[in-house]
Each structure stands twice: as structure tokens, then as C-alpha cells.
Amino acid sequence: MEQTEKTTLAKKGVKYALILVAFLAFLIIQPFTYENIDAGNVGIKINLYGTNRGVDNITIVTGRVWYNTWTTKIIEFPTYTQSVDYDPFVVTTKDAAEFKVDPKLNYHVNPAMVPQIYRQYRKTLTEIEQQFMRITIYDAYRIVANSFSSDSVMSNREKFEDRIQIILTKNLSKDGFVYDQLTSAITPPESLRQMIDEKNASIQARLKAENQAKQADAEAKVKVATATGEAQALLVRAKSESEANRLRQSSLTPMLIQQEWIKKWDGKLPTTQAGGNTSLMMPIK
């Protein structure tokens, strides 16, 4: 009897152990999980089985999403601004000069077009950046560079980059990528760089000479103006003195002269020697 009870208990223990193992195994291998779609991101839910399986049945999801990993796939695309620094490449102008370009692109994904992006490329955003988008950027530079001569690329830099922006905006937007900004470091060939440096040096020397000539001309004008002013001042003084002398002379009448002589006379008659001791008296008339 006791042996039978022990056997029964043992069987129950094995049964419960098997159930526990099975439950733990289910927890380990069960396919259900969830994905948190953070703010600034868009998730797409793809059915792997069923009549509508594949990319034809894609649902945009946000927030926390529960799904069966055996039958469903969740791919997350960031929709905030992305910045990609590409490796440098070389483009050729229409006169066969080679320019090195080191581009850096800022863009973001159009949330409404995320399903189309996945249907078309079936790749992650990082893979798309290094494949499709890099080729698009290279083609934009190649096409625009072929329409410029080597010297006009540097002298019309703004126009050059505006054309590239127009091409990129058009080609990226149709596939769901919104162009924000492109920063490009364009390096000309060494021979052209030397020519540009020499040209800049020549321009600087010419400008310096022109500035020096302008400065000398300005200084000369200042000297002329100063001399003219001094001459005019002397002329004014001379005219003033001449006018004063004229007025003084016109005011010296014979009567005024005689009165002034009488005021200054000390009472002694003027004398002169005419031979010996003879004195001559000069009467006052």
C-alpha cells in the first residue's frame, strides 16, 4: 500500500515537473513580444504569412506594438533629421578637371511614405543611405560638374551648389526623403589651386596699388586744399592791410598833419648851421 502511494506521488511529481518544464520552454520559445516605437520614429508592421503576406500588407504603427515574431515583422524608420557624412569622391568638369567632393547630407524621412520606401528598397535606412542616396548625390554632382568649366566651378560656387540642391530635392523627395541641407567641401586640382592662388595674389596686389594711388591722390588733394586755404588767408590779410593803409592815408589831411606836429612840438624852433655861428630862424606859417 505504501509502495503504491509512493509510486503515485512519484508519477504526480514527474507530471508536474514536465508541465513546469513545458511551461518554461513555452515562455522561452513563445513568439509573442512587443516593440516600442519612440517619438520621431515610424514603425511598419509586415505580415509574413497569410493571403496578404509580404509588402502588400504593411501597416504604420506607433507607440508600443505587440506582435507574433513567427508571423509578423516590425521595422522602424526614424523620421527626425539624419546627418550622413559620406566618403569623398571625384567628379570631372567639362574641361576634364578633377574635383574632390566631400559631402555631408542632412535629410529626414516623410512618415507617410515609409511603406513605399520599404516596398521599393527592402533595406534598412542605413543601407539606403550608403547605396541609393549616395549614388543619387554622386550623380547630382557629376551632372552639374559636367556643365561647368574648372574655373567657373570656383568663381560660381553658389550657382553650382544651387543646381545640385535642385536635383537632390527632386530625386530624393519622389522616394520619400526630404532634403534639408547639403554641405560640400570642394577641392580643386593642384594646378587649378595654384592658378587661383596666383590670381588672388595678383588681384590683391592690384587692389593694394589702387588703394595706395587713391591714398596718395587724397593726400595731394589735402595738400592742395591746405595750400589754397593758406593762400586765400594771406590774400585776405593783404587786402585787409591794404584797405587799412588806404583808409589811414585818406584820413591824413595837411591840417591833421600840422595839428599832430604842433601836439608833438616841444617849444624849440628848429635850427641849422649855415657857415660859422650864424643861426637861421624858420618861421612857422
Image: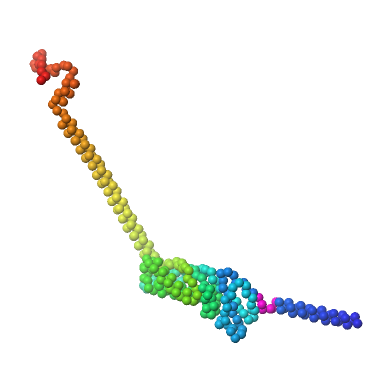
Q: Quadrant of residue 164?
A: bottom left
In what quadrant of the picture does the C terminus appear?
top left
Q: Is residue 25 magenta?
A: no
Nearer to us in this view, 225 or 59: 59
The residue shown at (32%, 58%) is: 206
Residue 280 located left or right of residue 113: left
Residue 24, image x, y percentages: 73, 77
Provide the residue span drawn in magenta.
Answer: 28-33
The residue shown at (60%, 86%) is: 51
Nearer to us in this view, 61 or 178: 61
In what quadrant of the picture does the N terminus appear?
bottom right
Residue 240, image x, y percentages: 21, 36
Residue 52, image x, y percentages: 58, 84
Q: Is residue 87 visible?
A: no
Q: Quadrant of residue 148?
A: bottom left
Q: Is residue 248 visible?
A: yes
